[in-house]
Amino acid sequence: MIAVLTLIPLYKVIFLSSRNLPQESWTTYFHWSNGIWSQNWLWFLPVLFLFNILYLLLSRVNIGLSNISFKKALLGAFLIGFINSFCLDIFRLRGWTHSGLLDFQNERVLIYFLAFLLGAYCFKRNVFDAKPKSMILYTIVNSIDWIPITVYIIFLLYPWFKPGHYIISEIIHKLILWFSYLLSLLCLMYVMIETFRRYLDKPGKLRNELNRNSYYVYIIHVVVMGGTALLMLNTAIPSLLKYLLLTVSTYGVSHLIVYLLRKVIEKRQIRGSL
């Protein structure tokens, strides 16, 4: 609630200022203004909160999901996500649902929840505790993951350039579209997780601090990016250099803000306990 009610109005101030537009009535800065309920880039916050509530309810019901093997859990999540997205697309139910509390993309929200459950499953089963050994699968996926990604992009964009037309037929087109989407997602998740486990999962003071900050950095980074971009807007810096400076400074400043706020909160907690 704090993030949605502060960051979205603040970003609109930056948005208007960067375009030399006059500021508007204060009521228009909130996500319910003009009859449009949208939490913008912060849509994931209430959705993730809902996932936690649903997971809590599932954990209270002993249905034996934790006894399923990892391969079966992964295959089950893949098939359920694929069938769900395909059916929603076929029945013309794609798109965003906006409400006062939740914003989500209809055809993807279940996929996100299944990924959330897989993460919880891997944590409970200690799937990632052992260090990966063989490089064979990692090398293969790194070499071929461009294929499902390219197929997905082609089948996604084709109807945009030729509305009402499909490469083969509508059903085959959408079967390939969502299968390649889920396969792309699976490949990218595997590559990111394995890359982190192999090369970045090491102890260190800086890494520990970045880890503690990461969730909150994701919440505030868009506003920090907007403010930083506003400062650089009229500077005589080449565009590519601006892009690089914006990326690095947003990451650094966001971490610094979160780090300082955490330290202030920790000091107050210590004083309160004395």
Image (tube, rainbow, N blue to C red):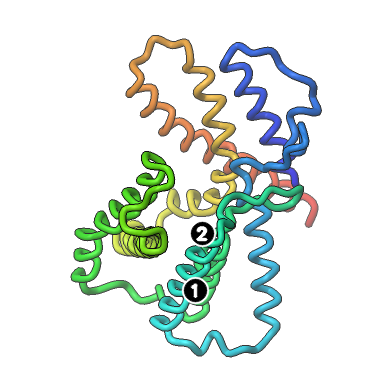
Image position, residue 82 (x, y; %): 45, 68
Report helix, strand or loop for mark 2.
helix
Task: Give the residue pinned by disc 2.
Answer: 89
Q: Is residue 16 left or right of residue 143?
A: right
**Which is nearer the eye, 218 or 111?**
111
Quadrant (top left, top right, bottom left, bottom right) of the C terminus: bottom right
Residue at image position (36%, 52%) is: 166
**Type of the residue with mark 2:** Asp
Which quarter of the figure has residue 20? top right
Residue at 51% in and 61% down:
90
User: Could you say which is closer to the camera, residue 246 or residue 213?
Assistant: 246
Task: Give whichever of 235, 179 is nearer the camera.
Answer: 179
Q: Is residue 255 left or right of residue 166?
A: right
Q: Please report whichever mark, 2 or 1, sits nearer to the chain's N-terminal start.
A: 1
For mark 1, give the secondary structure: helix
Q: How many marks?
A: 2
Determine contact: label 2, label 1, CB under 8 Å.
no
The percent coordinates of residue 251 (x first, y second) are 47, 37
Disc assigned to residue 219:
none
Residue picked out by circle 1? 80
Q: Is residue 201 visible?
A: no
Residue occupying image coordinates x 28% and y 51%: 150
Q: Amino acid at mark 1?
A: Ile
Neighbour class for label 2 at 10 Å: few (<14), some, many (≥20)?
Answer: some
Give the quadrant of residue 223: top right
Question: CA–CA distance between discs 2 and 1?
Answer: 14 Å
Residue 161, located in which quarter of the rendered image? top left
Kindly tell me whether residue 161 is visible in this rendering.
Answer: yes
Q: Position of residue 149 (x, y in %)?
A: 31, 54
